[in-house]
Each structure stands twice: as structure tokens, then as C-alpha cells.
Amino acid sequence: MSLEEIKDHQLVGKYIQPETREVNGVLLTKIMSDNWDNIWNFQAKPDDLLIASYAKAGTTWTQEIVDMIQNDGDVQKCQRANTFDRHPFIEWALPPPLNSGLDLANKMPSPRTMKTHLPVQLLPPSFWKENSKIIYVARNPKDLLVSYYHFSRMTRMMPDPGTWEEYIEAFKAGKVLWGSWYDHVKGWWDVKDQHRILYLFYEDMKEDPKREIQKILKFLEKEMPEEVLNKIIYHTSFDVMKQNPMANYSTLPTVLMDQSISPFIRKGMPGDWKNYFTVAQNEEFDKDYQKKMAGSTLTFRTEI
Ligand code: PPS
């Protein structure tokens, strides 16, 4: 059964606010952790494309761009299903009878495009063995934290975020789903030149979508006329995606995502963090950031 078929009353109590458990020090939901052997043993294929990211980094945006590229700018084809059914989220699972990401991926004909938020050390090893292509998208931690906080408030599929103050501390300590953001972005950065990985930044996509989409085209070994490229830029713009029911998660039952609390496609604006961090919180965050990112060549822009 797919998520959009399920009724609110079937979900109450059973699906909401999951228990969590660590896998090798990384916080996941208990269901993911119980299913860990199957996730780890997932069989990737050489023609798979994986879109990897930390949560709230611009995954859905990248998924829509990739789907538009793969469908040569055909909007109708990209409306065939919800983002989460078009691209299996490999480690994600809710209790039966709902399909897990693995169920969807295993049923999907090749070539498959899939999504993951797993840190590099937890990626199923078959992706490396099969040399599948991977697009990693990263986003500055301040905007990402704000986005993750609002998302955690509106979805019942994640633990409650607590207060803003509590959430900043949990994020810095890596005690949120998918673990430490710092380890995640550095981990994928460190391996990007050893595999077929395209490492993108949300802020770059926002600054110049054409340039970044061209990078994706090159990585996917595709060419397309200027007019199709422009169509992709338009269809994947914030305002258009916000209105697209196949991309904005509005088909999900309210009990799972209450978009009246905060929309899934919310603000999409680098620098929005300034509306939330106090001066003191920002200074503390920066100090902690310097320690955690010391020695890395990876840098982020917190505004454009
Ligand atoms: S998830 O749940 O982890 O898959 O979320 P993810 O898709 O990675 O991130 C959601 C944030 O991406 C923003 N978004 C966009 N920004 C700019 N342009 C487009 N087209 C776009 N689509 C989604 C979305 O609004 C979330 O960020 P915030 O800051 O909350 O607005």
C-alpha cells in the first residue's frame, strides 16, 4: 500500500512520532534500525542514480530537476507520481502495509533513480561495488537547521523537535535523525573524487540554477536544447514546485504532515536563518562549527 492511499484513522497511534535507535552511532528510526541488515545488503546496479543528501538540503528540488532531465523536460511525465514514489527512499520505512523504500526500489525497473539521507559510512556497499552514479547535495547548516526544525514540527514521522533552543543543541550534538550534519557533509566530501559523485550546493543552485543544471546534465551525459533547459529551470523553481502536488507532499494525510503548521516547500531562501538565530545563538553556533569543521577544505555560504 502506498502512503497516499492510507486514511488518517489508520495512522493514528501506529505511525506517529517513531521511536529512534542508533546504527553505528547514527540516529535512525527504530524501523530503519530493525530493517538495517536488509538496507545494508541492498543490491545496487551500475545504471542506478542515487540522490544523496542530509535531510532538508534540497533533495526534493534535485529530484525534480533530475526527473525533468531524464524525461527531456516533459512535465506530464514528471506528474506521473509523487516524488517519493518516483524515487524510492532506500532506507525509509513505515510499519506495514506501507511499502518501504526497499520494496519500491526492488520492484522498480532499471534504470532507477533513488534517494538516501544515509551518511557515507552507512551507504550500502553495493553502490561502491557497482560504481553507480551519485549526486550529493549539501546546504549550509544554519538554513538547513531552520528547515529541519520546521519540518520536524509539522511531520509526525519524525521525533518531536522540542523547543528551538533544544533543537539547536540536538542538531549540534548530532542527536537528530541521520546523525551529525558535520560528519555527513565532510564524509561525502572526502570521497567525492574517488567515485562517480557530483557534489552540489543548495546555495549555488539558488544563485544560478542554469549553471548547476548544466553540471547535472554533463554528469548524466545528456545534452538538451536551450528551450528545454529553460523549461526545466521554470518547472523546478521554488514557486512552481510549491504549487506542484506531485512534488510538495500535499497528497499525504494531514496526520503525517500537517502543512498548516509549516509547508513542506516552505521558504527556500538562503539567509532565512537570520530570522531565527539570536546573536548569541549564532556566535555559539559559529564557534562550535569552527571546531567541528576544522581541517576540512569544505566551505559553505550562509547567504548569497
Ligand atoms: S527532505 O524532506 O529531506 O527530502 O527535504 P529536502 O527536499 O531535502 O529539503 C526541503 C527544503 O528544500 C526547499 N526546496 C526548494 N528550495 C528552492 N527551490 C526549490 N525548487 C525547492 N524545492 C524545495 C524547501 O522549501 C525546504 O527548505 P526550506 O528552507 O524549509 O524552505
Image (spheres, rainbow, N blue to C red):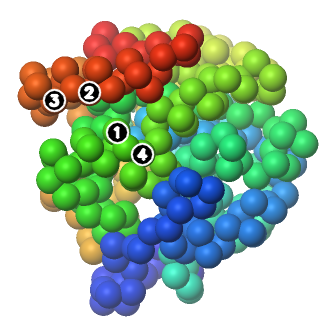
Q: Percent position (x, y) of residue 50?
A: 69, 42
For disc 3, the marked residue is 281
Instruction: Identify which residue is drawn at 55% across, 15% down.
Output: 296
Q: Could you tell me if the residues under marks 2 and 3 are in contact, i.e. CB atoms within 8 Å?
A: yes
Q: Percent position (x, y) of residue 115?
A: 61, 48
**Image quarter of residue 56:** top left
Foreground pick, 197 / 216: 197
| Dot 1 or dot 2, earlier in sequence | 1
| Amino acid type, label 1 | Lys
For disc 1, the neighbor class at 10 Å (few under 14, some 14 to 19, many from 20) is some
Q: Could you tell me if the residues under marks 1 and 2 are in contact, i.e. CB atoms within 8 Å?
A: yes
For disc 4, the marked residue is 174
Q: Secondary structure at mark 2?
A: helix
* Separation of marks 4 and 3 at Cα, in angstroms: 17 Å
* Quarter of the image where the C terminus is located: top left
**Mark carried by residue 172:** 1
Q: Percent position (x, y) of residue 223?
A: 73, 17
Foreground pick, 146 / 282: 282
